Image: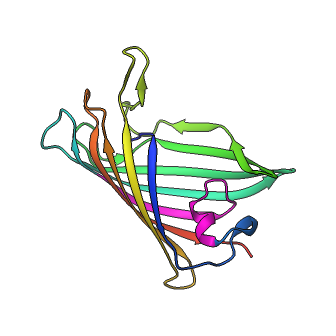
Amino acid sequence: MKSALLALLLVSVVEAQEAGSDGQSLAQAASDPTASLMNVQLSDWYTANYWNLPDESANQFVIRTAYPFAWGKTKHIMRLTVPFVTHHPALSSGLSDITLFDLMVFDKSWGRWGVGPVALLPTGSSEMSVTYNWDTSEWSSLPLGASILKMTKPGSIPVQWSFQYEYNFADDQVVAKNLFRFTAKLLFPTR
């Protein structure tokens, strides 16, 4: 289920401090969406229960990649997200909607910022979720979450492990109530 985090509590447990992109440590770059760090994420998103839909759960496996490149003088990060629904009370199992995002990154003296287009390839079912319903003037998704991160290097490839929990306070509709995400992000830093 797609939702926007309104607040995120972040607890980071970091052991590896290798040099990453733009002078950041590898652990910092792994958590920075504007860092030029190639990676592949393998995630399992489990919805334990829903508001207004008792005794139902859902699960999906998500593959997400980030590939940094330059086009002229502009730095880009291409992100591809491919979700597979493995279990859902209302959706068929299989490939869900694929998203492709081209983030153009701009370095400034005060930091980095980015902007770019997003393309949604409707490869899944026709059901789409929204965060705010403008017609009824109410939230359809109002989550609060926490995340724990750990960086390891089990072999030659560094991996950032993360566990996220999200509780959705919007209880007027059928939305995920308790969501758990487990992710292994394989990092491919350039030297």
Q: Is residue 44 magenta?
A: yes
Does residue 86 appear left or right of residue 26 in this picture?
A: left
State the residue at coordinates (47%, 36%): 122
Q: Is residue 5 visible?
A: no
Can residue 68 be seen by looking at this rendering? Answer: yes
Residue that protrudes farthest toward the bottom in the picture: 155
Q: Nearer the viewer, residue 129 or 17?
A: 17
**Residue 35 position by quadrant:** bottom right
Give the residue drawn at x 65%, y 51%: 78
Point out the stretch of residues depicted in magenta. Answer: 26-46
Q: Nearer the viewer, residue 103 or 180?
A: 180
Which residue shows up at 69% across the image and 75% down it?
19
| Residue furthest left in the image | 55
Left or right: where does residue 142 sit relative to residue 150?
left
Specify the farthest residue to the top: 135
**Image-quadrant location for residue 9:** bottom left
Residue 59 lies left or right of residue 126; in this view the side is left
Q: Position of residue 171 (x, y in %)?
A: 25, 32
- Residue 135, image x, y percentages: 40, 14
How many numbered discs?
0
How far from the left and from the top, in percent, is residue 129? 38, 32
Figure quadrant of the N terminus: top left
